[in-house]
Image (tube, helix red, strand yellow):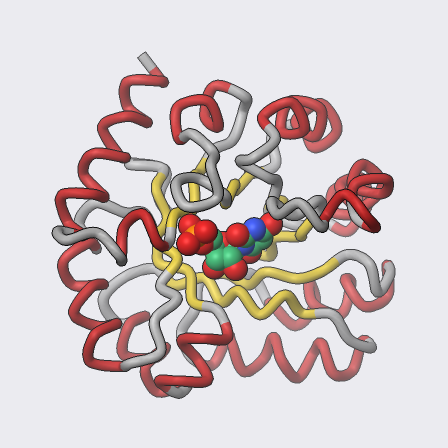
């Protein structure tokens, strides 16, 4: 995945035509498109394949099962042409190692603490341990909350030069520039782009904010 605009579109759209239309308007402004269950369940894995032919795709399947099932899920993502996959750390080392092995070079990003308020309940107390596990198993990077820039700073100290991808900008209240200044490599944005009257212009504006923060 390139490191250029540092912006990743979260394409949480269930209508295939609409989703592909938005991706086409935004793809020149973003380094990758992240697809999650809304896209896959609504549009099908064939749509992931179509998208992956045009832009780098990260499958946000938050893979969280026993090792064998994780392997099967990651293999499907790989076959769709995705360049990356998002996995959960909480099922433990063996489950995460199965993801890394099945990825066969595809980027693996590990969720640490999530960006919504409920993450305080179970994830917050163990986020650092999960980040350490991501480093230990050889993941490409972690997912860290743009809603908590201080947490990004703390996790950066643990993960060194692993990639940090941060969702929570826009609709969830996080700021793109603060997220980058806290040490994230990429900002993941969904609604603030795809719900905008002009998604291309909205993406351009966020990309400009990120560029400004890097100066
Ligand atoms: P939005 O910008 O519309 O809030 O979308 C954020 C995207 O990032 C969604 O696809 C969501 O599932 C994902 N995400 C998140 O918001 N917080 C996390 O901690 C992890 C995520 O994957």
Front one among 85 and 205: 205
At a point 26% along the width and 34% down the height, the residue shown is 207
Name the spot of residue 29 as percent of width and height, x first: 21, 45
Front one among 18 and 136: 18
At a point 45% along the width and 75% down the height, the residue shown is 38
Q: How many marks?
A: 0
Location of the C terminus by quadrant is top left
At a point 78% along the width and 63% down the height, the residue shown is 97
Asked if residue 10 lies left or right of residue 115, the reply is left
Q: Is residue 33 visible?
A: yes
At a point 44% along the width and 38% down the height, the residue shown is 186
Asked if residue 111 lies left or right of residue 44, the reply is right
Name the spot of residue 17 as percent of width and height, x first: 19, 80
Name the spot of residue 28 as percent of width and height, x first: 17, 49
Asked if residue 130 lies left or right of residue 107, the reply is right
Asked if residue 179 lies left or right of residue 6, the reply is right
Q: For residue 158, which quarter of the picture? A: top right
In the rendered view, would you say 147 is above or below 97?
above
Front one among 214 and 173: 173
Taking the view exactly as shown, the residue that stands out farthest to the top is 215
Name the spot of residue 12 as percent of width and height, x first: 39, 66
Q: For residue 147, which quarter of the picture? A: top right
Q: Is residue 107 visible?
A: no
């Amino acid at each position: 995945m390139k490191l250029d605009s540092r912006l990743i579109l979260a394409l949480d759209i269930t209508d295939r035509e609409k989703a592909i239309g938005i991706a086409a308007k935004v793809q020149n402004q973003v380094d990758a498109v992240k697809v999650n269950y809304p896209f896959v369940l609504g549009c099908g894995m064939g749509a992931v394949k179509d998208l992956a032919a045009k832009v780098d795709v990260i499958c946000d399947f938050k893979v969280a099962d026993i090792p064998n099932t994780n392997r099967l899920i990651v293999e499907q993502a790989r076959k769709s042409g995705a360049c990356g996959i998002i996995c959960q750390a909480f099922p433990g080392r063996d489950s995460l190692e199965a993801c890394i092995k099945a990825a066969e070079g595809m980027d693996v990003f590990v969720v640490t603490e999530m960006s919504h308020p409920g993450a305080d309940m179970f994830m917050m107390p163990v986020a650092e341990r999960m980040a350490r596990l991501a480093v230990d198993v050889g993941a490409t990077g972690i997912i860290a909350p743009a809603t908590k820039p201080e947490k990004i700073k703390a996790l950066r100290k643990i993960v060194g030069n692993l990639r940090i991808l941060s969702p929570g900008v826009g609709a969830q209240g996080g700021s793109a520039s603060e997220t980058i200044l806290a040490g994230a490599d990429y900002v993941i944005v969904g609604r603030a782009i795809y719900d905008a009257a002009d998604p291309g212009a909205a993406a351009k504006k966020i990309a400009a904010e990120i560029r400004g923060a890097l100066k």
